[in-house]
Image: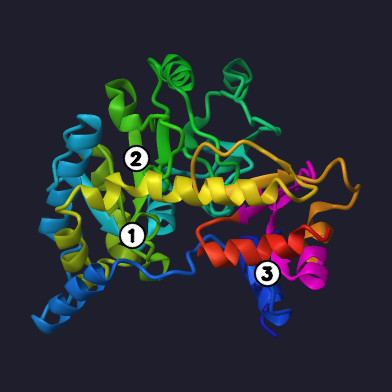
Amino acid sequence: MIATQSKLPGTGTNIFSVMSKLAEEHQAINLSQGFPDYNCDPKLIEYVADAMRQGFNQYAPMTGLPTLREVIAEKMSLLYGANYNPETEINITAGGTQAIFTALSAYIHPGDEVIIFEPAYDAYAPTIKLLGGLVKPYELAPPNYEIDWEMVKKLFSANTKMIILNSPQNPTGCVLSEKDIKALIKLTKNTDIMILSDEVYEHIIFDGKQHHSVALYPELRERSFIVASFGKLLHTTGWKLGYCLAPEQLMKEFRKVHQFNVFSVNTPMQVGIARYLKDPQSYLGLSAFFQQKRDLFRNLLAETKFKLLPCDGSYFQCVSYEHLSDEKDVAMAERLIKEYGVASIPVSAFYIRNTDHHVLRFCFAKKQETLEKAVERLVKL
């Protein structure tokens, strides 16, 4: 055996893979990993098939097809009044996670500090550590996972390089308010701190609430990367396509890394998506589609012993079982799979310190019959 030294010694297989594998072994209903169990619009599949038949089967430009970047620019202008240059400020990526990895890789040096809000998507911290950066976690707590911005300010130091936002948030379903945004603007004013805004669930927001994209605010837009996902938007997580937006100065460095990471991404799917997104209804109707699922799932879960936590966005519903058991959330999630046949994600997995508030996350991007069948089993708890 050769001698090796791990760059991520404390990192194992991620919780999504672990729970999905366990669900498969026990033939459990998988409400753990965030993917739909229904198909995307047949029209979109036909558009992609047409592109293949028409010969769009070779490398796309490194930055993405111009037609797709132009459609994204139109979408940002329509929704947020933000003008992004499709030639210099938009880049198509192999999913949202690759965009996050690339943005961090372009700017984080050893010793740089990055503030994240936990529970946080599990790709943030390992990527920062891989690059030699230091993770400065701010821990949020149920039921509302509210941010105390005065406490966030105390995390600032001379080495603070970036803040990572995620709204609507995975796993909590919380969304940033205008008050949050104004506090962030105040904190970052007259600094060189960058923002990485993970907005992959931007179109999945409920009860008439507004998505406060950093694109809406010039003071933040000038210092921000915005990451988005076609997988979440189009019910096509397996296609692994997304995009990143940033001011030209920031995007130049992003592209330097991107070109040596994946270079370009799936050509016929870019052609099909560009054609599909020309109709704004392809994304404007998404909130209503998922609100129906959220409301159904919450009504069903109300019959169980779980306590429902707020869900203002994303397609995840968190529940507390603190009043039921002192079990660790990992143990509870495993028991739900083995004894009740339903897979969830223990929310402690989204904290670096594995902070356990006895909360589980369920994905409701599923068929109605899937959700009904799952809750039929959970009511037995």
The C terminus - image quarter = bottom right
Q: Is residue 220 above or below residue 325?
A: above
- The amino acid pointed to by label 2 is Phe
Q: Secondary structure at mark 2?
A: strand
User: Which class describes the residues within 10 Å of circle 3: few (<14), some (14-19), or many (20+)?
Assistant: some
Which residues are drawn in magenta? Answer: 335-362
Residue where numbered disc 2 is placed: 225
- The amino acid pointed to by label 1 is Leu
Q: Going 15% across and 50% down the picture, which residue do you hit? A: 71
Residue 75 vs residue 242: left or right?
left
Residue where numbered disc 1 is placed: 234
Q: Nearer the viewer, residue 234 or 296?
A: 296
- The amino acid pointed to by label 3 is Val
Asked whether 343 falls inside the magenta stretch, the response is: yes
Q: Are marks 3 and 2 in contact (CB under 8 Å)?
A: no
Q: Going 34% across and 40% down the picture, which residue do you hit? A: 225
Residue 355 rendering spot, x and y as whole percentages: 77, 43
Residue where numbered disc 3 is placed: 18
User: Which class describes the residues within 10 Å of circle 1: few (<14), some (14-19), or many (20+)?
Assistant: some
